Amino acid sequence: MSKQKQAELRKSVSPFATSNTRASVFQIINTIVPYFLLWFLAYQSIAVSIWLSLALSIVAAGFVVRTFIIFHDCTHMSFFQNKKANRILGTITGVITHFAFEKWKWSHSIHHATSSNLDKRGTGDVWVMTVDEYVAASFWGRLAYRLYRNPIVMFGLGPIYLFFVSNRFNRKGARRKERMNTYLINFSIALIYALLIWAIGWQAFLIVQLPILFVSGALGIWLFYVQHQFEDSYFENEEEWDYVKAAVDGSSYYKLPKIIQWLTGSIGFHHVHHLSPRVPNYNLEKAHESTPPLQKATTITLASSLKSIRFRLYDQSSKSFISFKEIKKYLKDKKPELKITTRASVQEE
């Protein structure tokens, strides 16, 4: 795609990069209010059936994901036109979702600026190793990576680490505003937890809150993972990296059933979001439908997205992801200079 066409593509999306106060307020009402209602109903249902309470907690977790999308838009300053309003709502939704607003705003902005850039990995993204890096790595380096990419660790332990460790501490070098925001959100969460435990007891609190956190965390990690980890995703070194290509070819269009699309705030239109982060979530589908070139982005469905679980390493030769199984023969040789050319050639050998 020429620079002129790239400019035209970004220009065609710009009309959608405007927030609508009425739409934003309505989204707050139809997202956060139902979440609190479902939380209360899940608590009330404990006396009737633990399973009914669990079912309601799972539904509530879906609304936490939707709340996170509001939080996410606030970090891009796209949910409201007023920056202060974005920061206030972002901090409030940060308490609900257990994310530190200013901290995540910083790391996520880096993710957008470096997504699919092989020379600038490591901040705000999923850990990806190339084939050559993995083959050349030490035993402990490979073990750490395999554990990290294990579904049980990533989607099972990942939410626990994210909510109670990673999101609770400031990064090294954080500015005062960022640090104070993290402290405020941590204090608010601790206070709310203490009040709820005092009011309903720790057993009832855990029965409701733990499933909500675990399910919403696992779903959130899955969405973030799958939208950049598809077989022929775009990755390039700095000298070849291109922002528009990274957005359109390095982010998928996750075509989801309408109810799931609604709960996930249309974040499945991830290619649109990466092309123009200022487009609020309720305009993403409109931008996609109104821009034919964006409709050519890699489309994945619930069924096809499950294949991404086995995409572990990025092969720069074939420009695609491969599995750990396909790399075994190279580990035996321990010759970093050997490179995989295609999936078929590995199978033939």
Image (cartoon, rainbow, N blue to C red):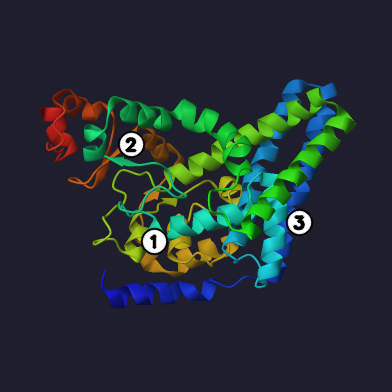
Residue at figure coordinates x 54%, y 71% from the top left: 17
Q: Is residue 331 above or below residue 274?
A: above
Q: Amino acid at mark 2?
A: Phe
- Give the crowd class for mark 1: few <14, some 14-19, many >=20 residues within 10 Å: some
Residue at figure coordinates x 42%, y 37% from the top left: 303
Residue 36, which numbered label? none
Residue 284 picture location, percent across and down: 52, 62
Residue assigned mark 3: 29
Q: Amino acid at mark 1?
A: Gln
Q: Amino acid at mark 3?
A: Ile
Residue 44 picture location, percent across and down: 85, 30
In the image, is 156 to the left or to the right of 191?
left
Quarter of the figure with the C terminus:
top left
Residue assigned mark 2: 311
- Assign a secondary structure to mark 3: helix
Residue 295, which numbered label? 1
Residue at figure coordinates x 33%, y 57% from the top left: 249
> Quick one: 42 or 200, which is closer to the camera?
200
Front of the two marks 2 and 1: 2
